[in-house]
Image: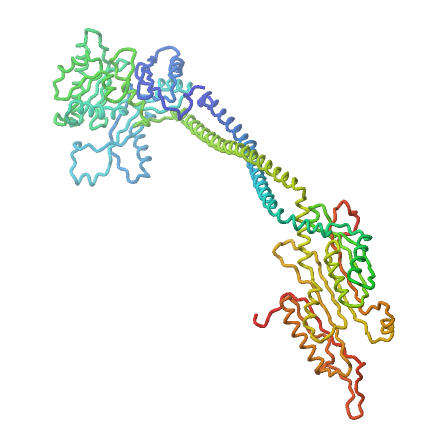
Amino acid sequence: MLKVLGSKRLTFICLMVAALAIIGYAYYDFIIPAHEQSTQELETSKAAVTQKYQDVARLKEEYVLLQSQLRSYKELEARGFFNDQDRAAAVDNLDKLSKYAQLLKANLKFGAGATVKDEGADLAGQVVLKSPVDVEVKSIDDVDVYSFIKFVEEKFPGRIDITSFSLNRMEIFDTTILRKIGSGSPTPLVDAKISFDWLTMAPKNVVAPTEGVK
Amino acid sequence: MAISGIPFFPPSRAVIMMMDEGVCVHRVANGSSQYIDTVSWRVANFEIKLTEILEAAKVTSVLILNDAVEQHYRKERILIPTSFDKANIIKRRLNVAFPSYPMRAAIELKEQKGAGAKNKEDKDVDKSKPYLFAASPSTETFSRLIRSIQNTDYNFFGYGLLPIESASMLKVLAQKLAEKRKAPAKAEWTILIGQHRGGGLRQIVVRNSELALTRVTPVEEPKEGYSDIWAKDVSRELQATLSYLSRFGYSPDDGLNIIIIGNKEFADVLDGMISVPSNFEALSPFEAGQLLGIKLSFADGDHFTDGLHAAWSGKKLALDLPLSSKEIADISGPRKIASVVMLLLTCALGGVLYMASMEAQGLYENSRNLEVANTQLAEIERIYREEIKRKSALGIDVNAITSSLDIDGRIQRQHIDVLGLLKTVSGELNNLRIDSFEFKNEGDVLWKSPSKTEMPPTRKAKLELSFSYAGNTNPKDGNKEMEDLVDRLNTKLKPMDYLASVSVPLQNLTFSGAVDQEVGLTANLRASSERYTSKVLIQKVDHVKSPGQ
């Protein structure tokens, strides 16, 4: 049979089979994977370009936006929003504000502060600090209490969120009180209890990471 | 590797004219025929020599054309009932006709108009068709020929009988000559006479393009200056052929073409020797080849006709009547299968190469696109860095600004303005006086949803106002005063999403209330120091619907 087919024919068939096998092997084991890999790389690269374009567009938008945000940020900064809630300074501040408000007495209680988990703050390398504050106030007039709250809201560094506020007018027809008033000593006629959360932002590196996280 | 082994390469064919004295090899390619060599049967190492000649010819296939004397023909009419039985019937009839000749075949002929002169009724009854049966003996010389071919790598194209394969050539030649004479080709009969290299004078007679008669007679080859001797021999043989023709139904009215192919010097002498009315033409092989569109190339003179026959059959895509035998099948079968395999392999290789080239092209395009994308990426990164630098130049931390403003915004949004609420309440008190109040505010001031579209929940804020009334006040009047206050408050507070209600009246005067009071002439009246207390509750709500909504 081999003689009938002839050496050239057989050689040709063998060469063709070999060529087919080599090219087939190269096709399936090298070219296709290489093509797939290059397609993947291309897609990744295109996605990276698109992402970067979006980033640049976002940056440009932010740049324009920042021009307007910058003023608000400066205002926020000026009112002490970026504050590590130093208790001594806070007591000083509230003392000054109570005096401005003509309060007879204000009893201050600062609870233990905590950090509030917030992604936006994390991104900026900041943490949100939250401290509960209780103030027991005694004054002659309820207007003084309202003034005190107004001053705290406007002048106290950071933001405050009033969680409770109660006010009680004392009975003026009490003989003891009337006697005190008559003697000219400052007699409280209103007592109030104010509780608020004090909220500020502070750099992460300033606040110890072991503090409680809400 | 020689291209001869590739079956689908532009065909070139070696035509082996098998004669009584030996074989004559022609190479036919691209419409031209070239005489290569003649090998006598008697020569020593015949097979080796023929193999060498074939190898040197560099062709793709080999055709054997039988030009020997021993060829057997028979015309028979066969009735074929259905086309399914055709092959079996013909095979059986061939067995009966030529039982001792293994190489045989049959070809269907056209019904001759004059032959038989059957009337219409006979035609209707006799539905048989005329067939030409042909056979050739399987000789030792043929086996030697097959062995020679087997020693080469060429494909075996086929084995045919020269007169049958050349019958179509006669028709074409007669038509061309008629066109040349500018006369209509009306003659039914055509005789082609030519001297072949084996020393035989081959006469082929066709009637309407179908073989009617063929003869090979030994005629001495012409010599220079003795043209009349050859012409006389040819004339004698022609006369003998014409006498045979009358038995085949030839009539002078049918018309006769006589074509002599050979050296013009010898052929022209014949013209005066032929007395039968006919269209006589004497042509050289080159002239005949020119008419047939074949280019001939001889090295041994311009007298022999076998090259013309070889060229005509050699350029065919398929033989008119291929003969088959076991010897032929043994060599052509495997080689045909191998050719198919080679063709399939080549197609497969082409397909794989095509797919590979497409993938490679895709790979190349990807690499080009990747370069472009990387360039774009580098450029956009440069722009990005510039933007960052520009922001950095402002001396601000973008994230610090955006996040702190966002947090502050969220605090402001969830902020409950208790002073604003108290101010609104105080505006509606008229002559009433609040003894005390209690404000409670619950909920997360820093609430943040993962979805930017979700609204924050309403904080649970409530303010309870306490009012004190003298004990001698009519509770009904006091309740009315409280209800009026609530109405006034709601008018102002509803737009602010607050709702006021009397939580504790001075005295519950409905069925659910418990009342303890003395009445009568001696009853003790309540003192003004015994005070009534009433409370109004103001609550933050989601959204207060007005009556019209």
Q: Quadrant of the N terminus of chain B?
A: top left
The relative height of residue B470 versus residue B218 in the rendered view (above or below) is below
From the top left corner, tell me how far across and down residue B271 is, in percent.
14, 16
From the top left corner, tell me how far across and down residue A36 is, in percent.
55, 36
Q: Quadrant of the C terminus of chain B?
A: bottom right
Query: In the picture, residue B267 is in which quadrant?
Result: top left
Viewer-nearest residue: B404 or B549: B404
Viewer-nearest residue: B544 or B52: B544
Q: Is residue B272 left or right of residue B534?
A: left
The relative height of residue B523 versus residue B427 in the rendered view (above or below) is below
Q: Is residue B437 left or right of residue B257?
A: right
Residue B366 visible in the shown view: yes
Viewer-nearest residue: B226 or A77: A77
Q: How is the image coloured?
A: rainbow
From the top left corner, tell me how far across and down residue A173 is, in percent.
83, 76
Q: Residue furthest top?
A: B225
Residue B327 visible in the shown view: no
Query: In the picture, residue A25 is in which quadrant?
Result: top right
From the top left corner, tell me how far across and down residue A151 is, in percent.
74, 59
Q: Residue at x 81, y 53 (%)?
A: A87
Q: Residue furthest bottom?
A: B521
- In this rendering, the count of numbered labels is 0
The relative height of residue A182 versus residue B305 in the rendered view (above or below) is below
